[in-house]
Amino acid sequence: MSSSEAPQPLLSRPRGALKGTLTVPGDKSISHRALMFGALALGETTVEGLLEGEDVLRTAQAMRQLGATVERLGEGSWRLQGRGVGGLCEPDDVLDMGNSGTGARLLMGLLATHPFTSVLTGDASLRKRPMARVTVPLSHFGATFTGRSGGRLPLAVTGTATPVPQTYELPVASAQVKSAVLLAGLNTPGITTVIEPEATRDHSELMLRAFGADLTVSVRDDGARVITLVGQPELTGRAVKVPGDPSSAAFPVVAALIVPGSHIVVRNVGMNPLRTGLFTTLLEMGADLKLVNEREEAGEPVADLEVRYSALKGVTVPPERAPSMIDEYPILSVAAACASGETRMVGLAELRVKESDRLAAMADGLKACGADTDVAENDTLVVRGTGQPPRGGAMIPVNLDHRIGMSYLVLGMTTAEAVGIDDASAIATSFPGFADMMIELGADIHGA
Ligand SMILES: O=C(O)C1=C[C@@H](OP(=O)(O)O)[C@@H](O)[C@H](O)C1
Ligand SMILES: C=C(OP(=O)(O)O)C(=O)O
């Protein structure tokens, strides 16, 4: 929310079973990358199914400011004329990435090897988030950064004209850091190597290859993934088809699982195995969740999800599953609060540096709604369910965090007392139309 906009409080309360079929908006991770790679490719790139959420619109605007032609042809349908690798030009104003960590961090990778200075900023949430995780490896290429402590935004980046290729081993499992280093490597002569001890979403690798980059992935004896990229390729514009976002599908899926009598189908959901940890976990909890019409579209697996209300039981989610469901812990903890028995979600330190401290937001908010929750050692979120939904009856601060807002609206669909959120505006970053789609399925969500 910008300071000029009034907050949008919403209340969610039960109205009965959720029924129907819906299609969630396009994948946010793939949408950002389609715009960035399209801006770097020669010739025309077309994108169908682009997420027209605020985060992605910020990336579209940044690509325009850097000289690419970016046009909206119709709903979700976009066309770009790229500048070629190394061909971006100096922006004449600040690049405002809004609420988007992905947009800001990937863009810093791009800018690190373009020899001009840009200034990046974002909203109050993004300006708190750590950027040293990208400025440190990008400095090794030769870029210089002047930012606030911790490298936080606003920050100026001056790209280098003589980049030195790097081999970088990720200290945190982060697809954003991996992608930032690969994007810097694109305009660097020689081979850039990224080593990731745990596999994170691989949309950058898949899409770079599809645009014509020479990129290899191998698995080391210790299980680490080694990604090599040959610098200064000629990328060629192409058609990109964006599947529905599994991280958005997570909300109606969990809603149907916890609202008695529900039966919904979510169409066209991306099923990249590095994104589906939530669905694996829900199946372990006893969810009646079926994948139908499994297919492959434009290099990504896709399916429809058929979901029925289920009596869920608590499980332990191992830390090694975190990268494949990192954005889904808030909504999983809502499912856990309605399940019977204890759910332990282990190793969630990264949740503390998302749009808000999601570990605190879920532990505190669920407690305020009457659930039995704790944060245990090793950043473990523990939720002890009774097999019945908690009472509800709280107004939750969203702190500019879309996933926190949507999680509590879903909880309110099944609690005896309504659940409110103090500001729904952030939801439009990733899931514009969320409340209306849920109302269409039978939810009762309205202004507080
Ligand atoms: O690369 C991406 O598109 C993303 C990576 C993840 O962040 P981290 O790299 O910080 O884990 C995820 O939380 C974010 O929503 C999208
Ligand atoms: C963490 C998220 O996004 P970002 O880091 O791009 O702001 C998210 O969408 O949950």
Image: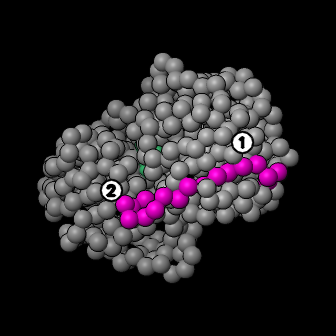
- In-front residue for pair 360/243: 360
Label 1 SS: loop
Amino acid found under the numbered disc labelled 2: Gly
The residue at the far top in this view is 377
- Up the image or down, 120 lies above or below 171; here it is below
Give residue 408's position: percent from left, percent from top. 61, 45
Q: Is mark 2 within 8 Å of ligand 2?
A: no
Q: Which residue is mark 1?
A: 417
Q: Main secondary structure of the magenta part?
A: loop
The quadrant in which residue 269 appears is: bottom right
Residue at image coords 58%, 44%: 395
- In-front residue for pair 113/318: 318
Residue at image coords 44%, 37%: 357
Give residue 287's position: percent from left, percent from top. 77, 38
Indicate the quadrant containing the N terminus: top left, top right, bottom left or bottom right. Answer: bottom left
Q: Which residue is mark 2?
A: 122
Magenta residues span 1-18
Residue 74 in the figure: left or right of residue 315: left
Residue at image coords 66%, 40%: 393
User: Distance between the Cα atoms at labels 2 and 1?
Assistant: 36 Å
Residue 1 in the figure: left or right of residue 165: right
